[in-house]
Image: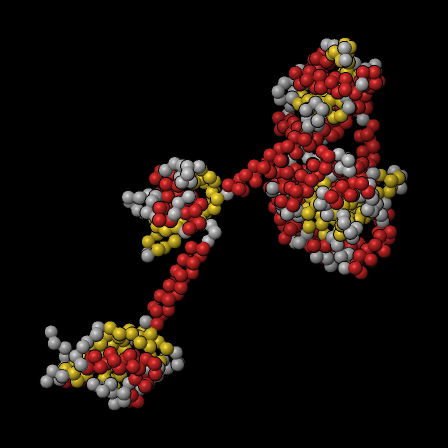
């Protein structure tokens, strides 16, 4: 078929041709052999802002092309007029606004009656957007390729739809190959199951792909088999990507062998510390801490089941005489033998603990009566040979039973202790049950509660006030914080120890108003001082469990014009024991306010280390009991050093409390302790006694 000639173009088609040229978005330009414009359709006019009359009879190039593009266009045009008809050509046209538009041209030549080229017809499409998209895609792919190749994590591109090779490896980076012991060339084309200990993708591939599609991306942990055969743990993240219009999965894998080893070491250290913190070194029995925890669990179980639990307080009669006559080594041997016998006389579900000295406690759910206590006494009666002497062991036993006795672990022990002393008063080697008539302390507690309630109604006249104890830099002695300590001097009771009235407040529900008063007063004083270091306030787990606690802290800070970092809250791990998830959630909200969080009495509870892994705290506060012998005990130094190293590994600050001697301070400095608190560096004092110290600190800062 011959191309149309010029006369056909100019005269044929009539109104139809004109209509088509007028409505099409395609650029249509007709040129004579010298490049002069014959037709310049409306699409061309809209793009360039030029009218057909303005360009008709003019050489087109200066109107629409940048100078550097003219030579190339003229070469193509010369080929067209010579009879060579290239199908497509691309160049840029200047648009009406001055921007350059990318045009894809289709060209043809029209012949006259003699077969010579008389006109050139070019039809063009504006493909600027397509070219920009293509360039963006290429740049994205280039960036992806760079990230893919240079990533320290192992990256692998998988085709989950290959019918022959399950989850075929399409590509991977060098880090992925090295992690698994292969080169990329060895892995590409293989199933990812080559690296799995079992054919995971062959068996579970469809389910896993559905999971990735639903969650996108997904994360988890798994295992890979190295080329040398050993299996190692990985952390993996998988997401969907489209490559060439086909669905692929991009995997990002990381070898977490070192993390697992570190975690195992941390767990081993935690287990060692937990065992040391929870067990008596002499007998291996649970100590008071573990006993209280188990008793707490049993009391909670009793609350659900309606059954009873007994605490039996066992004290050896005449133990001091054995120590004095046969020596402490013989006394230790006797205590170990007593522990063995008591354990042998109880059921696996029962607990036998040593509180210290010659005091033991048995926790027995569903106590059968005095006969169970007599069984324990009978287990101790056979003579024990100590240093060649036969010694007969006698014991006094006090029993507190819940219900009806206290549901609080420490109080139930106290009641059992009272009953034991009653057995001793009545001649020893006897068993006595607790009776309300023994509980003078209970009446005292009620009296304290009543006076405390009245004091909270009018704190200023009721005798409530705060003292503050400095927390200082162990090296320089510079003040780095103040702990607010509540004190109470009642008109009738006199000075009441916090150890007495705070448990009463917790038991009676007064801890919420008491805690709110302490927090408000500490923040008020910090604002009055213009304190430049945090003020620390002790908080009960019962306070944190309240739904309005976070709002109350925020409102108190705002009331006194303080920001979150001006406040530090000290909490004990009892918070986590009550409800770990709630505790973590509440503490995260406090952290969002900028409030510092300190885990107090660290090293005293059984779940301290595991608590660290879940609670978002900033600081550990080592209990004073841990440093009693730190100045001269290698064991204490190792324990404290291990705790400091643990805190550094978890990026936590450490405050050591109870520092009372220069030798303790020097030992703690040598161990790398940064902050200390205690009578040596500053006793608790009323605000007015600390004004000079605070002013000096504010001036220095």
Viewport quadrant of the C terminus: bottom right
Between 519 and 623, the one nearer to me in the picture:
623
Residue at 58% over, 37% down? 265
Displayed quadrant of residue 111: bottom left
Instruction: State the count of labels.
Output: 0
From where the camera sits, is residue 63 visible?
A: yes
Q: Where is residue 596 in the image (x, y as percent from the top left)?
A: 68, 50
Residue at 28% over, 85% down? 60
Q: Where is residue 176 in the image (x, y as percent from the top left)?
A: 43, 48
Displayed quadrant of residue 316: top right
Vertical position of residue 647 compared to residue 71: above or below: above
With 69 as the anchor, is 86 left or right in this view? left
Residue at 74% over, 47% down? 675
Viewport quadrant of the N terminus: bottom left
Between 38 and 43, the one nearer to me in the picture:
38
Q: Position of residue 565 (x, y in %)?
A: 70, 54
Vertical position of residue 54 compared to residue 184: above or below: below
Vertical position of residue 526 compared to residue 500: above or below: below
Q: Where is residue 171 in the image (x, y as percent from the top left)?
A: 37, 51
With 66 as the anchor, is 395 left or right in this view? right
Between 481 and 351, the one nearer to me in the picture:
481
């Amino acid at each position: 078929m011959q191309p149309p000639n010029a006369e056909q173009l100019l005269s044929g088609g009539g109104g139809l041709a004109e209509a088509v040229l007028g409505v099409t978005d395609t650029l249509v330009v007709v040129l004579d052999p010298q490049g002069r414009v014959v037709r310049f359709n409306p699409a061309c006019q809209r793009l360039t802002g030029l009218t057909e009359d303005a360009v008709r009879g003019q050489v087109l190039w200066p109107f629409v092309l940048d100078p550097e593009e003219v030579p190339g266009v003229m070469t193509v045009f010369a080929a067209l007029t010579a009879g060579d008809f290239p199908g497509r050509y691309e160049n840029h046209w200047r648009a009406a606004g001055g921007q350059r538009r990318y045009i894809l041209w289709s060209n043809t030549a029209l012949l006259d009656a003699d077969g010579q080229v008389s006109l050139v017809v070019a039809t063009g499409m504006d493909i600027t957007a397509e070219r920009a998209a293509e360039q963006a895609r290429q740049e994205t792919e280039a960036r992806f390729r760079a990230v893919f190749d240079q990533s320290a994590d192992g990256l692998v591109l998988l085709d989950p739809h290959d019918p022959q090779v399950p989850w075929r490896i399409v590509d991977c980076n060098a880090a992925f190959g090295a992690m698994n012991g292969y080169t990329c060339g060895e892995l590409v084309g293989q199933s990812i199951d080559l690296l799995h200990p079992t054919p995971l993708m062959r068996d579970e591939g469809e389910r896993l792909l559905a999971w990735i599609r639903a969650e996108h991306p997904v994360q988890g942990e798994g295992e890979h088999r190295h080329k040398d055969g050993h299996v190692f743990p990985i952390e993996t993240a998988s997401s969907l990507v489209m490559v060439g219009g086909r669905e692929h999965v991009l995997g990002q894998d990381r070898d977490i062998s070192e993390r697992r080893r570190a975690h195992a070491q941390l767990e081993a250290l935690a287990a060692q510390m937990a065992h040391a913190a929870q067990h008596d070194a002499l007998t291996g029995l649970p100590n008071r801490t573990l006993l209280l925890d188990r008793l707490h669990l049993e009391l909670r179980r009793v609350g659900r089941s309606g059954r009873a639990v007994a605490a039996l307080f066992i004290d050896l009669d005449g133990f001091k005489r054995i120590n004095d006559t046969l020596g402490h080594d013989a006394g230790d041997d006797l205590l170990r033998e007593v522990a063995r016998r008591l354990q042998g006389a109880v059921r696996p579900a029962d607990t036998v603990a040593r509180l210290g000295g010659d005091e033991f406690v048995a926790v027995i759910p569903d106590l059968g009566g005095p006969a169970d206590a007599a069984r324990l006494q009978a287990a101790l009666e056979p003579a024990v040979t100590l240093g060649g002497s036969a010694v007969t062991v006698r014991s006094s036993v006090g029993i507190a039973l819940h219900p009806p006795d206290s549901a609080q672990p420490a109080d139930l022990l106290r009641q059992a202790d009272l009953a034991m002393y009653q057995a001793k008063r009545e001649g020893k080697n006897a068993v006595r049950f607790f009776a309300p008539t023994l509980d003078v302390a209970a009446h005292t507690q009620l009296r304290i509660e009543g006076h405390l309630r009245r004091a909270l109604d009018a704190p200023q006249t009721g005798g409530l006030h705060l003292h503050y104890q400095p927390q200082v830099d162990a090296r320089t002695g510079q003040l780095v914080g103040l702990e607010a300590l509540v004190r109470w001097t009642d008109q009738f009771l006199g000075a009441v120890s916090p150890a007495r009235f705070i448990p009463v407040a917790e038991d009676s529900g007064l801890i919420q108003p008491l805690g709110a008063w302490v927090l408000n007063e500490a923040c008020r004083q910090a604002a009055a001082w213009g304190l430049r270091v945090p003020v620390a306030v002790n908080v009960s787990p019962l306070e944190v469990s309240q739904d309005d606690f976070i709002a109350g802290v925020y409102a108190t800070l705002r009331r006194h014009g303080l920001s979150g970092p001006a406040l530090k809250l000290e909490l004990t791990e009892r918070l986590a024991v009550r409800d770990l998830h709630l505790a973590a959630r509440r503490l995260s909200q406090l952290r969002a306010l900028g409030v510092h969080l300190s885990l107090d009495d660290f090293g005293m509870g059984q779940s301290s280390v595991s608590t660290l892994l879940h609670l978002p705290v900033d600081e550990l506060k080592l209990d004073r009991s841990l440093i009693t012998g730190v100045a001269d005990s290698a064991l204490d130094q190792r324990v404290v050093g291990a705790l400091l190293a643990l805190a550094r590994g978890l990026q936590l600050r450490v405050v050591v409390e109870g520092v009372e001697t220069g030798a303790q301070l020097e030992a703690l400095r040598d161990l790398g302790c940064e902050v200390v608190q205690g009578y040596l560096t500053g006793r608790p004092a009323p605000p007015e006694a600390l004004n000079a110290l605070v002013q000096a600190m504010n001036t220095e800062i």
